[in-house]
Image (cartoon, grey):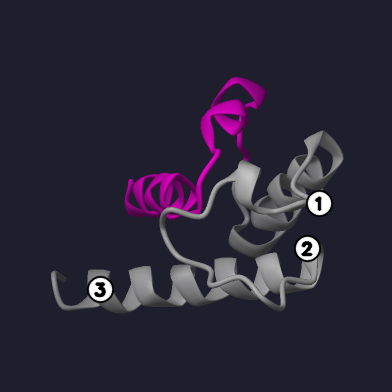
């Protein structure tokens, strides 16, 4: 089972990167764990809602509003999804 977790995490990371490219049309920014709302012009409140909805649909999970507020970096988003999916 431990062999499966890194592959699952990699799939999650790739999906998140794809979502960022689709939602925010990122071209000149490297998407990494440290990328935050202040780094992406369109990652405002509306952009955040679009991102959370896309994540919920992609991974078939529900993200409470109070949790979504803290998901302010790519790393936090990936860690959160991995935690939800692994339980």
Q: CA distance from mark 3 to mark 1?
A: 30 Å
Mark 2 Cα-neighbour bin, 10 Å: few <14, some 14–19, many ≥20: some
Q: Give the residue number, with chain letter if any, for mark 1.
A: 42
As rendered, which of 40 and 48 lies closer to the eye?
A: 40
Query: Helix, strand, or loop for circle 3?
Result: helix
Query: Dominant secondary structure of the magenta stretch?
Result: helix
Closer to the camera in the image, 21 or 5: 21
Give the structural element (helix, strand or loop) at label 2.
Answer: helix
Question: Outermost residue, right direction?
Answer: 46
Distance from the alpha carbon under mark 1 to that under mark 2: 6 Å
| Number of marks in picture | 3
Which one is earlier in the sequence, the residue at label 2 or at label 3?
3
> Which quarter of the picture shows residue 7?
bottom left
Please say if the residues under marks 1 and 2 sit with CB atoms less than 8 Å apart: yes
Q: Is residue 58 magenta?
A: no
The quadrant the N terminus occupies is bottom left
Image: magenta residue range: 62-87
Q: Which residue is mark 2?
A: 24
Q: Nearer the viewer, mark 3 or mark 1?
A: 1
Residue at 78%, 63% in the rendered image: 24
Q: Is residue 55 left or right of residue 16?
A: right
Measured Cα–Cα span from mark 2 to mark 3: 26 Å
Q: Position of residue 81 (x, y in %)?
A: 46, 51
Q: Residue furthest left?
A: 2
Relative image position of residue 14 (x, y in whole percent): 51, 77
Tag 3 residue: 6
Q: Residue at x 47, y 68 (%)?
A: 12
Which x, y percent locates residue 73?
51, 46
């Amino acid at each position: 089972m431990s062999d499966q977790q890194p592959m699952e995490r990699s799939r999650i990371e790739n999906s998140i990167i794809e979502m960022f490219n689709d939602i925010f049309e990122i071209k000149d920014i490297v998407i990494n764990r440290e990328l935050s709302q202040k780094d992406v012009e369109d990652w405002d409140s509306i952009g955040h809602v679009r991102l959370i909805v896309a994540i919920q649909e992609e991974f078939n999970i529900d993200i409470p509003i109070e949790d979504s507020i803290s998901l302010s970096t790519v790393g936090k988003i990936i860690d959160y999804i991995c935690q939800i999916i692994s339980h």
